[in-house]
Amino acid sequence: MTDSNIALLIDYENVGIDSLQYLVEQISGMGRIIVKRAYADWSSERKGQERLIELGVEAVHNYRTPRSGKNSCDIKLTIDAVELLHSAQVDTFVIVSSDSDFVPLVNHLRGSGKSVVGAGRKAVTSTTMVKSCDRYIFLDPQTIGIQKSGSLSKTNTTRRTTPYRDRRQSTSNQDKQDNEKSVSQLLIKAIEATVGDDGSSLGTKLAQTMTRIDPGFDYKELGFRSFRDFLTSRREIEVTVREGTDFTVSIKNSEPRSLNGQDNMEPAKKPSVSPRIISFDKESSDHNSNDLPDNWEEKVDIAWKSKEKDQLSGQAAANQAAKIMGFQRLRDSLYPTIDKLLDASNLLRGNWARNKNYVTRKK
């Protein structure tokens, strides 16, 4: 697999030098940075030029006259981006600016099939700019641990590696509630958008969906080393490890949360136990099957056949089976998925087979 080619275009007067080292480190994991340019009137921005050279960034000088105003650098950056779009093998554009004037450029680049990552200061970045990008990296000093000298502060470095609930003590109660509420809402929206027939979402797909819904979301900024660590800290969901590194996520219906309420806005706590690991044991399942209605296998088979179709959607089949077995959802039963349901019954396995998102009748 070849690395993605990245063009880093910096509106220097809008961002400054201190955060660029952190940004370069962040985007280096995405691929090869083949273009690095910072746009400014360097006759008035002399202090950062040596640091730019250390980072291998080309300083693009743009004279600014009293009539030209600040937009002259923005226009030069936009022109270069469009030229690179057509003349260079660039896969991802990183536009470093908090200015919403770049939204049309971002839309044009994405419309041409390119990925666009934005970066800027959170306090001055418009929501429109964040939502327009595929991902947005916030460059606030308190987030990345930058001192005025440009070095990493020990205090702030520690803050990035400590749990989210400890770091938030410096913010007001209202900020805590608002931030917790927005993270919870984003998580629930992403699960609802990716939920499968079994009522759960794949963890890898969920991470991608959360970033697409809110490009400004970053679990590392919340103090977690991995996305799974972030998920296991959430009280409103259940993380289930299945095989290897694969895991699924589902909403906990037993502990409903009011996203608009104030009494549920406590900081998320990491659980004291590991995520639940499903191991299906047919013998133990048969032992517990006495709790199910008599002849439930025959009843499920008849219900599926009554549709007079060669195949049923997995959701429809699961709903019918759950109703017959006395559960609201199949995932609440002894056999939380269609595959496990078929494996538990010789009758159903002999008459039906799972085919992707459908249950197909055997001939």
Image (cartoon, rainbow, N blue to C red):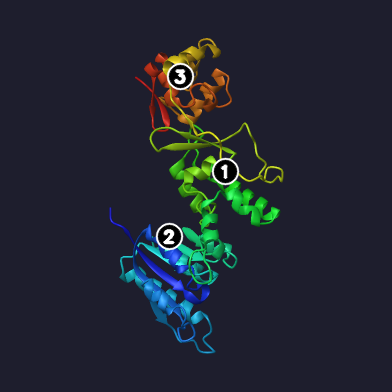
Q: Is residue 182 above or below residue 349?
A: below
Quadrant in the picture for the C terminus: top left
| Residue type at numbered disc 2 | Gln
Which residue occupies 39% across, 18% down?
Answer: 349
CA–CA distance between discs 2 and 3? 55 Å
The one of 352 and 328 positioned closer to us in this rendering: 328
Secondary structure, mark 1, is helix
**Numbered label attached to residue 26:** 2
CA–CA distance between discs 1 and 2? 27 Å
Q: Is residue 56 above or below residue 180?
A: below
Secondary structure, mark 2, is helix
Q: Which residue is mark 1?
A: 188
x%, y% of residue 301? 46, 17
The answer, for residue 338, to whether it is visible in the render is yes
Q: Is residue 3 left or right of residue 117?
A: left
Q: Which residue is mark 3?
A: 305
Which residue occupies 58% across, 62% down?
Answer: 127
